[in-house]
Image: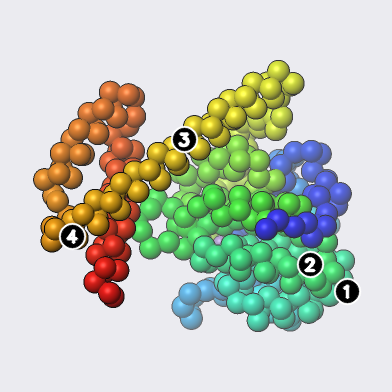
Amino acid sequence: MSKDLDILPLQDWLPTGGKPLVIAGPCSAESEQQLLRTAREIATIPDVKIFRAGIWKPRTRPGEFEGVGEEGLKWLEKVKAETGLLTTVEVARPAHVELALKYNVDILWMGARTVVNPFNVQEIADVVKGHDVPLMVKNPLNPDVKLWLGAIERIRAAGLRKIIAIHRGFHYFEKSPYRNAPMWEIPIELKSMLLSIPIIIDPSHICGQRDLLQPVSQKALDLEMDGLMIETHFDPTQALTDAQQQITPKQLDELLGGLIFRRRQGNIDFQNKLESLRTEIDKLDGELLQILAKRMEIIDEIGEYKKENDITILQMKRWAGIIRDRLAIGTHLGLGERFLRTLLNVIHKESLQRQTDIFNKSNGK
Ligand code: PEP
Ligand code: MN
């Protein structure tokens, strides 16, 4: 399913200069001094066009710093007047939207904890209706592309056309170096469902720590994402929220300076060569799938045969032999051992599952 909600391209309403959009600013507005000092330093970096700050902070537990509220909006007006940066804040309740508009915030965003709940999203959609205000929609906490899409559809249905999706990673149970797993396939799927949506990446909430910001930002650009939102604080160690992931304006400048902005499209020779290589890949993938299907057919046949002869499904000795043999062949062909083990395990798991299904079916279950 792919559709086009006629969302405006970024360059139609933002001064991007054809470059990826960069949003920077602290996780939270903490004091007038912290906000203005951070903004002044950020304003010296020409690539940064928008200043972010959380005014109302969704905290996991009560008693933690919950943001400065309305007061912070006055500081943001000063930031705008002094630096010329556009401003953006998170809104989670209709009252937040009303206040943000009252104090001339340029762009609103909905956080991951709001987007998980369609009731909340609809309330925000109802209150932005009739305003020509841009709204950015973060992905929901859980990796559910439809929930993300649904939130964008609700906002679009309220009449807004200046909409951006923000990819900030997903809650994930397995151990991972990231605070929120990037699962790049999900923003890519969103883009394929919604052709006109600009997507920017929030490496700060994906990484949860400073060290990974650079490679994740580069990956975002390599995947043709439309921009970055990076939490920046003049003194991150003293930050009241997300201290481990914020960087100084100077570090931000270095990070941006180190990024490689690859061309989206090369010249015609490059395009032709790329096209022919891609055609080859398509063909090989087709063959790979046919071979896998054939392998599974034979697995099913073995399953039937084992069933008829009352032989158990799992034959450890045979499996150990397969691993040894295939690893030797695969590594000889230049494939990595870790990749081979993962691949063989997935194939084995599926084979066992198919044979189990056959056993259950012929038992009349
Ligand atoms: C934030 O941007 O500071 C924030 C709370 O992000 P998220 O909604 O992605 O957790
Ligand atoms: Mn944060």
Label 1 crowd bin: few (<14), some (14–19), many (20+), radius 10 Å: few
In the rendered view, tell whether residue 125 sits above or below residue 77. below
Is 275 drawn above or below residue 95 in the view shown?
A: above
Q: CA distance from mark 2 to mark 1?
A: 11 Å
Is residue 24 positioned above or below 310 on the image?
A: above
Q: Which residue is mark 2?
A: 156
State the image coordinates of residue 314 (x, y, percent, origin top left).
17, 55
Mark 3, residue position: 287
Marks 2 and 1: which is nearer the front? Answer: 2
Q: Earlier in the sequence, mark 2 or mark 1?
A: 1
Mark 1 and mark 3: Cα distance apart in space: 53 Å
Label 4, ligand 1: CB separation under 8 Å: no
Instruction: Compare residues 52 and 348 and report the one nearer the observer.
Output: 348
Q: Which residue is mark 4?
A: 308
Q: Earlier in the sequence, mark 4 or mark 2?
A: 2
Q: Where, by quadrant of the figure, is residue 154 drawn?
A: bottom right
Q: Is residue 12 visible?
A: yes
Q: Which residue is mark 1?
A: 130
Q: What residue do we see at 21% from left, 54% from top?
A: 305
Q: Amino acid at mark 4?
A: Glu
The three-letter code of the residue at mark 2 reads: Arg
> Which of these two is toward me, 64 or 269?
269
- Identify the element where label 1 is drawn: loop
Write the residue at 28% across / 75% down.
365
